[in-house]
Amino acid sequence: MATVRSKLSVVLALILGVGCGGDGGDGDGDTSGDGDGRGDGGPARTCKRGVLAETPPGAAFGGKLAWWYNWAIDPSGTDHGVEFVPMTWGGNDVTRAIPAGSDYLLGFNEPNFHAQADLTAEEAAALWPQVEAQAATTGAALVSPAMNYCGPAQNCNGTSPYQYLRDFFAACDGCRVDYVAVHWYNCDLPSLRDYLEPGGGLEGFEQFGKPIWLTEFSCDPGASVAEQEAYMRAAIPYLEASPHVFRYAWFSAGPIPNAKLIADDGSPTALGQVYLDLPSDCP
């Protein structure tokens, strides 16, 4: 994950009208679709719901979630029927084998943050053929580097996630990228919608013409459990209905304790039960 306070400082700047954005783009790069709903952005409805968690989801989550991940190549704990999606977190992971049977591979984690994967767009592009080779071992679809606003600028390889992806695609001409991954921690539905869709105060990730994975989202660390729940109840119906969002994962990890969905024993917290009970296309 990224330093949440750094993210929020940029988000607040954007709300106040002093944030930085890019100048538009067409999202170059190949999209690979194979007819099973991966990478084609078609109208088919599938189970989108997932979780980012340090603790593996327990048996109660089986059949209620499509997937989970933990910022790593390999899962931890017991498989309870929830698909694990590996992540090539940073440059040191590009030669590591991904688990057999993996259908998807997540790209670098917030590479525009020095505190995270810490790669320029050009460095990420230069490493991407090795990520493609990892995915090829299982036929996995590829999810782009996971992006968010970064700040202050001296701690970043660029502050705008939109501009970073444009630079990445320009430097990685002909590279295979099936989906775009993004993170967001502002605690209201209008800003989430604005972040993803074009036409508002922000540019929107739909500009890249690829289905979106929202791989981290929740309220910020200062929000109460009640505020986390209120945001969840507002955001989930939107994400479920959006034809541009392929998958999403609530942030359930130590840095935001009031957002946690999974107790230490793998069972749902009270907020986790709300997450499981909200309507979805999951079985």
Image: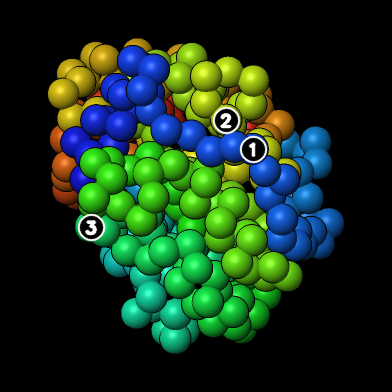
Q: Which residue is at the front of the view, 92 or 126?
A: 126
* Residue 24 marker: 1
The crowding category of the residue bearing disc 2, from other C-alpha atoms within 10 Å (few below 14, some 14 to 19, many at least 20), is many
Q: Is residue 22 visible?
A: yes
User: Which of the two discs, 2 and 1, labels the residue nearer the N terminus?
Assistant: 1
Classify residue 43 as left or right of residue 137: right
Q: Amino acid at mark 3?
A: Ala
Classify residue 186 as left or right of residue 202: left
Q: Amino acid at mark 1?
A: Gly
Q: Quadrant of residue 267?
A: top left
Q: Amino acid at mark 2?
A: Glu
Distance from label 3 to label 1 (Cα)? 27 Å
Q: Is residue 13 above or below residue 140?
A: above
Contact check, label 2 and label 1, Cβ < 8 Å: yes
The crowding category of the residue bearing disc 1, from other C-alpha atoms within 10 Å (few below 14, some 14 to 19, many at least 20), is some
Q: Which residue is at the front of the view, 203 or 282?
A: 203
Q: Residue 45: percent from the left, percent from the top?
A: 72, 36
* Residue 126 marker: none
Q: Residue at x 46, y 44 (%)?
A: 161
| Helix, strand or loop under label 2 | loop
Q: Which residue is at the front of the view, 188 or 110?
A: 110
Q: Is residue 131 above or below residue 270?
A: below
Q: Residue 216: percent from the left, percent from the top?
A: 39, 42
| Helix, strand or loop under label 3 | loop
Q: Residue 67: percent from the left, percent from the top?
A: 49, 51
Residue, disc 3: 115
Residue, disc 2: 203
User: Which of the two discs, 2 and 3, labels the residue nearer the N terminus?
Assistant: 3
Q: Is residue 1 above or below residue 175?
A: above
| The C terminus sits in image quarter | top right
